[in-house]
Amino acid sequence: MIMKSMVPNTLVFLFGFFLLFVNVSELSAQEAPADKPAKAGIETRIGYLRAYEPQLALSVLDIPPRDEGVAGASVAINDNNTTGKFLNQSFALDVTETKRDADVVPAFKEMLARGDRFILTDISARQLLSIADLARENGVLLFNVGATDDILREEECRPNVFHTAPTRTMLADGLAQYLVWKQWRRWVLLYGSHDNDKLYADAVRRAATRFGATIVEERLYEDKGTARRTDTGVIQVQKQMPVFTQNLPEHDVVVVADESEVFGSYVPYRTWTPRPVAGTAGLVPSSWHPASEQWGGSQIQNRFVKATGRRMLSKDMQAWTAVRILGEAVTRTKGNDAGQVEAFIKADDFSIAAFKGQKVTFRTWNWQLRQPILLGDGHGVVSTSPQEGFLHQFSELDTLGVDRPETRCKLN
Amino acid sequence: MRRPSCLLAATVALPLLAQPAWANMVYVSNEKDNTVTVVDSATMEVVKTINVGQRPRGITISHDGKLLYVCASDDDTVEIIDTATHEIVGSLPSGPDPELFVLSPDGKTLYVANEDDNLVTVIDVAGKNVIAEIPVGVEPEGMGISPDGKTMVNTSETTNMAHFIDTSTHEISDNVLVDSRPRFAEFKPDNSEVWVSAEIGGTVSVIDNKSREVTHKIKFEIQGLRSEQIQPVGVRITADGKKAYVALGPANRVAVVNAETYEVEKYILVGQRVWQLAFTPDGKTLISTNGLSNDITFIDTATDEPVKSVTVGQLPWGVTVAPN
């Protein structure tokens, strides 16, 4: 049933995506003339800089939709505009797309020239660092909605970069708390050979140490570039995965670190010994789940499906939250001055509602958004971390990820 | 026939009450199992369970007590239940995803919040037709009407506003910003103020009905609980306007607020995730719905102590009590 609905949905959201682009360019064109309409309100442009290339996945269901993230931002723009009409404020989204490994500086400079002072980024850590200081020199606030790299919140943190995407350590800690609560303390770690996979594996190792689990053995899966999702591939996989997981010491759970989608999704149901799988496959920690209905979640889910023709993914929620934070700041400060908006967001009592059952706030030492981590599989939400009993002197949400005493971030 | 036995039971069950309570039926909507539980307020026992539409939430009763109105959110309708037979006898065109509503003091008009469409739908109860649709903020929810019937207040959960609507023109006259995720609006009996709870903000804003400005902000602090766990939802103010009760969600408590000094005087421990509140007509008893413990708690308003908790259906959401 899911397969059947995928094709029309894909068409719908692809179509919707191009419409969005047309709208955005029309908006830009309308803004060019100096004379504004008689009833001049406050118009806030929010930029969205993304590096995009079609991505492969082991299952066709996991291929990211064309408008992943952007759709969340545009739903939040609509929400902000509904609020804005009572205050004579309006919001517009300015999307710029580059290639996945491209130099993003020229694209960023064009956004600067168009007057964007608030920019969401869905680009790699390297790309983000190439513009972060340039943004700061120009008084631009960046909202990282895509990169989970801890380094952006640690050694390479910036005072003008807010992060609504969770870090790998937050994700791994959220998962680890649940596995430990389940008393599944003996883990096998299977990790991929790409850099991102290794960073995810690092976060898993750190989480095991932190929460009292033991990694009884690790195995590296080399990406040899064989074809995915072909008939021969499937037959090979059925034989390959059991062999890859043969002769492991006694373990309770298999943790997979394969962000690159080379082998991870093949692990569930194919391990030598029957064990649950978690990590980037099986039970997956994330900032959102398309089936989350708790805490008013069905409201944003319904609104999102109606607007985009597909269900809401984590990156959509990360972008939605960033645009809502900006909307809230503009509404409350009654203006869009970047300095005032920044001061509002950085104030001690700032919080935002994001369908997570409690207010979410920023860590003032690195501007990472504190947030619960949802644990789900392809079907639904299994649990939400922090788990009960993991206590913290300030906020239980700070049991997830790098905490203040351990941070390497120096904001200045 | 029912009353004498109830009185007898009441004297046994409620030794704290000086006078025996009048028996009124209490109706509780159970969001997760599509039922309404009927509880006798005197015996505090379940009388009947009525099967209703999908995801029942908002619930209210006609002023003569003959008809019960239930928001069947996932069926996009308001169901009408005959309280004598407990049969569904009709429906009202509520618009999509009705969550909460309020009946005008004259009983003629029902104002419904349509959560998915950013609308308040105005329904003529007798004619069963839509009179007006009023665009409001994102995720409209709380609905309060002034006792004089002149002003309706809707709260929008993502816009974080209380929208003041003139009931004669169906136009918004004022928009007042409150704290995050406003859930409920309750007027004082003298029309002077409206109290708006903010679930994520953790506060209740008191808005002056003349100036339409926030004059007081009530905060809650409970020893041993983090501020994130204190999530105000349902609010009820006593008929004399002196005391207010605020349901605090996952804090599992109902706050008692002095409505003249705006000071919190007490926290009453009830069940898990306390959501909505209703008084019995004599004002002597307050009933809370406790969503996660699947029960309701009867509170004696003279002592502000819980008297008894009664198991109802799954995820009890709203509550209303039949008039005398």
Image (cartoon, coloured by chain):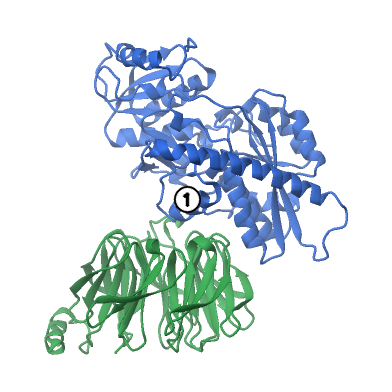
Chain colours: A blue, B green
Residue at which label 1 appears: A301
Quadrant of image for the N terminus of chain A: top left
**Observer-nearest of A127 and A391:** A127
Residue B198 visible within the image: no
Q: Chain of mark 1?
A: A
Residue A380 percent across, percent down from the top left: 36, 42
Residue B259 percent across, percent down from the top left: 47, 80
| Few, some or many residues within 10 Å of mark 1 (<14, 14–19, 20+) | many
Which amino acid type is marked by label 1? Gln
Quadrant of image for the C terminus of chain A: top right
In the picture provided, is A241 more to the left or to the right than A163? left
**Observer-nearest of A171 and B94:** B94
Name of the residue lying farthest toward the right: A34
Residue A64 percent across, percent down from the top left: 52, 33
Residue A203 to residue A5: above or below: above
Residue A271 visible within the image: yes
In the picture provided, is B148 more to the left or to the right than B76? right
**Observer-nearest of A76 and B85:** B85
In the picture provided, is B299 more to the left or to the right than A142? left
Residue A42 percent across, percent down from the top left: 75, 59
